Image (cartoon, grey):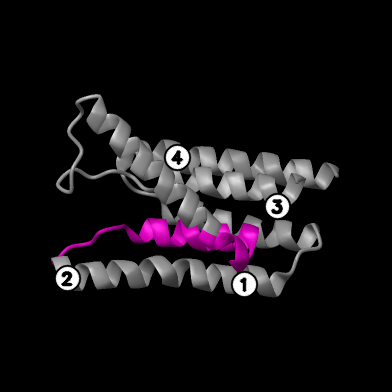
Amino acid sequence: MLETHLASALLVVLLGLVTAIDLRTLRIPDPLNAVLVITGLGATWALGGSLLAALIGVCVGYAAIFIINEAFRRVRGRDGVGLGDAKLLAGAGAWLGWTGLPFVVLIGSAMGLAFVAAARIAGRKIDAQHALPFGPFLCAGILIVWLTQTYL
């Protein structure tokens, strides 16, 4: 159980860093995403999880955001989401396995939409022309899914 708590603490620290940096710069540094993937694979191995599911999660996590962004770019002529978010979702796959990814995206998207709705109600202008970091919402989804998978 101590290993689980240590892994959880490490994940919280990494997600906190991603959130703080993405909020400030609208970017998620590649080295931080790499650490998230490596530690996720390490935690999966150390806690007796399926490395195959984690490796599939890394590939599916990255590919999902990459493909969505490519489609958006072809339709709108610009990026809709950054590849830092794709790498972040790859890190989520390393920590949660591929089965956790739909829930991460669902929770993160719902939280992002709720944030935009609340901001608009409060009179703050948020629209397609203003960049909004998606990483913090994905981080919240990752943490919620991790805690649910690990402790419930």
Distance CA(mark 1)–CA(mark 3): 18 Å
Which mark is in front, 1 or 2? 2
Could you tell me which secondary element the residue under label 2 belongs to? helix
| Towards the viewer: 85 or 129 | 129
In this view, the residue farthest toward the top is 122
Distance CA(mark 1)–CA(mark 2): 31 Å
Residue under numbered circle 3: 149
Say whether marks 2 and 4 touch (CB < 8 Å): no
Question: In the rendered structure, which disc, 4 or 3, sits on the residue that comes first in sequence?
Answer: 4
Which residue is painted at 17% across and 63% down in the image?
78
Q: Which residues are magenta?
A: 77-102
Tell me which amino acid carries mark 1. Answer: Leu
Tell me which amino acid carries mark 2. Answer: Val
In the picture, measured across the screen, residue 72 lies left or right of residue 40, that is: left
Question: In the rendered structure, which disc, 1 or 2, sits on the residue that comes first in sequence?
Answer: 1
Residue under numbered circle 1: 55
Question: In the rendered structure, which disc, 4 or 1, sits on the residue that comes first in sequence?
Answer: 4
Which residue is painted at 75% across and 46% down in the image?
152
| Towards the viewer: 70 or 33 | 70
Distance CA(mark 2)–CA(mark 4): 29 Å
Q: Which mark is residue 147?
A: none
Distance CA(mark 4)–CA(mark 3): 21 Å
Tell me which amino acid carries mark 3. Answer: Gln
Distance CA(mark 4)–CA(mark 1): 24 Å
